[in-house]
Every structure is written in structure tokens, then in C-alpha cells.
Amino acid sequence: NKTEEFKKKLLVELGNTFSDESNILKEGNLNNTYNVHYVGPREDFRQKPQEQVSCELMKTKLQTLKKADLNTSEPLKNSMPKRSFFQNKTFNSCAVIASAGALRNSNLGKFIDSHDVVLRFNHAPTKKFAQDVGTKTTVRVVNSQVVTKPEFNFLQSPLYKNVTLVLWDPSNYSGSLQDWFKNPEYNLFNNFVQYRKQEAKPRVYLLNPLTIWDVWDFLQRNSPGRLRKNPPSSGFLGLRLLLPHCNFVDVVEYMPSTRVTKRCHYFDPDQNAACTFGVWHPLSLEKLLTYHLNEASDYEVFQKGFVRVRGFQNLKC
Ligand code: C5P
């Protein structure tokens, strides 16, 4: 049937993208901007039971920074929240909305809004797209380019008001937190501090950049081929961020559905297949691995457009 045929083709395409990358990387001629030096094993996640892979993902520490993580001499200490993201909070259903072009005409708005928590990325809008992407936003994961580039208007835009914000910027793989404070890729700290000052009840966090590399290590440990030495995509980080707090997480239009086209974003006409299949992030491996963790039916994945991943509280590790 149609779903089976599409699935076969897609898995081949993701698999090919993935092994082409590994072959290029074997020859060692790609940049290593973040000085990644991985020494652990490279295993094939497909050879491991689903729950084992989930348990390994659970052991990674993706964390937001809190006051206690910073030295007393660090000027940013005063601006850090006391608690971490969603500390001690749990929910039943959570949804992560990848911004893929295939959300167009998906009619998933009501389904998305039915979740207790809805996580979106960067400047992805809901206004004018409610039918397909819903209206609810609980959390926004925002990269440092969107925080700092004037065209995104981070401090003023309503997109970033009345939601919980998780901001991130990549650090050096084996550098320290202090190195990152001194030398971020895009300097998001000023706007972070300013946002906390200007909002009545700011809920804004910074991802600890060293823990982002812990998630990368997990991906590399579970990948038989070499991975790109760039951080995981925010899509995968968003999933990992919610898994400790939800009974299950539905990741919407991340594993491409039959609606997939070359279009990058649902809110923007630009065509670029690399958004979906990956060029900079280790995206094809992320997607194959997420599909390995999936508990929804193939009809739900490839026709409706979501994978369902079991929350960490429901694992027996
Ligand atoms: O483009 P942007 O980084 O804002 O998208 C957020 C996340 O959604 C990406 O990090 C990626 O994981 C996912 N995405 C995708 N396919 C697309 C566009 C985005 O999987 N076509």
C-alpha cells in the first residue's frame, strides 16, 4: 500500500544521506568548527532494542543554566533563574512542532492544540496558520541568531511574549562555560539580560551549551557512521528537553510525511531540501533514530505526520 511504499523510499533516502555524509567525513575533509573530539564507541541503534536507546538518551544531561551553576565572579550570575526549565513539572501529552514545509495543508491545528504542552522553534508563527499548526505555544526554543539579528526583533516581537523561552548557542566541544560566556557564537547574553529586565514575569532559560554536546555524543555513540561535528538540530534538542516532563511527546512533521516537498518552512516559500534531510546538523541520523523510538502507527507517522516517543518516566531502565 501507499504508506508502505512511501516509508520504504523515505528510509532509503534518509539512510543514503546519512551514509554519504559518513563517507565524506571518513576522508576527514569537513570543518570541525567546534573542535569535536569524540573517542567513544560507534554502535548501530538499529541493533538495540527501543527501550535501551531511550534509556541511553535519558542518561544524557541536557540542562538549562541556573544560578548555582555559575561562579560568584560571573557577571551573568545575577540574571540566572534559580530553577531549571520545568523543574518538577510533569504533563500528560506534549507536542514538538518542527517547522517543516509539509505542515502546509496538514490540518493538524486541532490535534496540536489538544496537547498539554506545545513547543515551537525560533520565529515560527501561528497567526494565519492556525488550521495547520494550531494556536497554542507553551515553549519556544530559540537559537542565538534569532535572539540577536535585528530582523527577528527578539525584544519586541509578540512571538516571544507569554511563553517559556529556551535560548541556545553552541560552545566549543571541550571548552568551559567561562570560555563560552566570553566567546559565544552569537552574543545572546545582552538580549537575555534585557528580556529578563523588561518582562514582568520573564520565563527565559539558557541551555547549558556543554550539555548540548552530551546529546551529540549520544547520537554519535548510536551511529555506525561518523556524524557531522555540529550540534544536534533544535528539533532533536526540543524533543530531549520535553521527554523528562511528559508521558509522551508527539513530534510533528519531523519524520517527513507524504506531504513532504522541497519547501523548507510552512511559513516561507523558500525551497531547500537540506532543511528536511540535513546539511549542517546530523539531521538524517536524528530522524532515523527518532523513528526507532516511535510508538505511533506507520499511518500516523507517514500520513498524519507525527512520531510518538515515550516519556522518561515511563521507561524501565
Ligand atoms: O528551521 P528551524 O531551525 O527553525 O526549524 C526548527 C527545527 O525543525 C529544526 O531544527 C529541525 O529539527 C526541524 N525541521 C525539519 N524539517 C524542516 C524544517 C525544520 O525537520 N523542513
Image (cartoon, grey):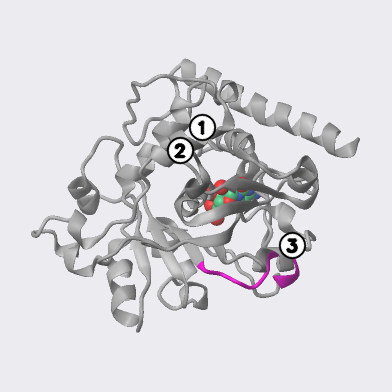
Task: Nearest to the eye among marks 2 and 3: give it.
Answer: 2
Looking at marks 1 and 3 on the same chain, the residue that comes earlier in the sequence is marked by: 1
The x, y position of residue 110, in whole percent, is 73, 68
Q: Is mark 2 within 8 Å of ligand 1?
A: no
Which numbered circle lies on residue 120? none
State which quarter of the image contains the N terminus: top right
Which numbered circle lies on residue 108? 3
Instruction: Label 2: state its secondary structure.
Output: helix
Q: Name the residue under label 2.
A: 57
Report the front residue among 87 and 139: 87
Instruction: Label 1: state its secondary structure.
Output: helix
Q: Determine whether 121 is above or below 236 in the image.
A: below
The x, y position of residue 303, in whole percent, is 80, 48
Which numbered circle lies on residue 53? 1
- Quarter of the rendering containing residue 80: bottom left
Residue sticking out furthest to the top:
27
Going by the numbered disc 3, the residue's amino acid type is Leu
Q: Determine whether 132 is above or below 283 in the image.
A: below
Could you tell me if residue 152 is visible in this image? yes
Going by the numbered disc 2, the residue's amino acid type is Leu
Query: Which residue appears at 65% of the width and 75% of the height?
Result: 127
Looking at marks 2 and 3 on the same chain, the residue that comes earlier in the sequence is marked by: 2
Going by the numbered disc 1, the residue's amino acid type is Val
- Per the model, the C-alpha gap separating discs 2 and 3 is 28 Å
Few, some or many C-alpha atoms within 10 Å of disc 1 (few <14, some 14-19, many ≥20)? many
Task: Nearest to the eye among marks 1 and 3: give it.
Answer: 1
In the image, which residues are magenta? Answer: 130-138
Could you tell me if residue 149 is visible in this image? no
Report the front residue among 277 and 218: 218
